[in-house]
Image (cartoon, rainbow, N blue to C red):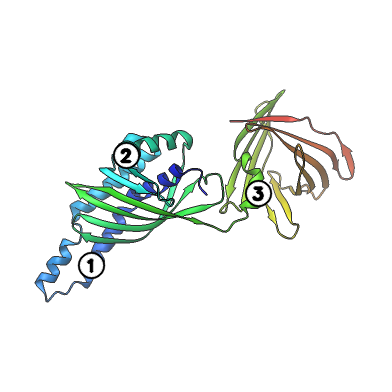
Amino acid sequence: MFISKSFRWLLLTAIVVTCWSNASSAVWSQQTRIAPKTTESTANQANQRAPNSDDEAAMRESAERFVIDFNRGDAKAVAAHWVEDGDYINEAGLKYTGRAAIEEEYANFFQSYPGVKIQVVVDSVRMINETTAIEDGRATLEPLPAGSPASSRYTAIHVKQGDQWLMKNVRDILVQHASNHNHLSDLEWLIGDWSAEHEDVEVNISFNWRANKNYIERTFEVTKQGQPLTAGTQIIGWDPMQQSITSRLFDHRGGHAFGIWSPGEAGWMIESLAHTVDEVPASATNFLMRVDDDTLAWQSVDRTVAGQAVADTAQFVLTRK
């Protein structure tokens, strides 16, 4: 589920303007092709149901402005895309009415979820008359919010006021998606960017959801005195054969490692088997510990390379950026 009702509301309301213009043009083309040319009154009626070029241009401009307003986090400008008494009904049946309420919800959203983008698919658009249209579609957010992955199905009513197309009413239904998220939910707190410095070594790590929250991708870079030491990418996911969380890591030199994750009182233990690019075997036991919501600790112990023991690493304490 999305984090909050306002979050789901914002997801739906944002998509309505974004994809309107192309869909309306397609509807106009379809109606023109099927209108009987032998009946003047029928042809006139079809023309009345289709937006003219000025309507299309206005809707395109409105969509562009909406995206700009949303991406810069301007709640007042976003709310101005509704009619004064516009409203939204979420999947729980809660209703938000008026630009002031809409602006307040967007302001809260932009403060809590900066930088979130919207992806939409418009399934259909129907012209009711020359000043009213209905749009149905689906939407998702990127990056995905906390919780089980989901998208929204929505229905939106547009009305034309003067030379503007504005939103009058929006209603959505939350659609849950099958995912391994439930197996990885204990790692959700890791999502984000982390950094640490130890003497002259700097570590930067990012955790991000991938593939409908079926996997977590970790990217990392370690530098010493500004010069790169190592970097790589790790994919963390649920392995149904192992019945545990496992990971695959690929470093910038061509080496790779396989890890089995086990939960413990202090955090996670990752038993890792690796091979360098020269096929030299290596192993280690890594510990990932949650200090608090914005602090984690990492250390690698019991390390071997080519069967020979090597020193444990220092413990790195990373903080959320």
- Residue farthest toward the front in the current orientation of the protein: 93
Rate crowding at label 1 as few (under 14), some (14 to 19) or many (20 or more) other CA atoms within 10 Å.
some
For label 2, the SS is helix
For label 3, the SS is helix
Label whose residue precedes the other's in the sequence (1 or 3): 1
Rendered residue at 18%/57% (across/down):
130
Q: Amino acid at mark 1?
A: Gln
- How far is the residue under mark 1 from the one under mark 3? 49 Å
Q: Amino acid at mark 3?
A: Leu
Rendered residue at 43%/47% (across/down):
118
According to the picture, the residue beneath numbered tag 2 turns out to be 79
Q: Amino acid at mark 2?
A: Ala
According to the picture, the residue beneath numbered tag 3 turns out to be 184
Which label is found at residue 31?
1
Label whose residue precedes the other's in the sequence (2 or 3): 2
Task: Please state the horizontal and vertical placement of residue 218, each as a whole percent of the image.
Answer: 64, 43
Along the line of sight, the residue nearer the viewer: 245 or 95:
95
Rendered residue at 81%/42% (across/down):
285
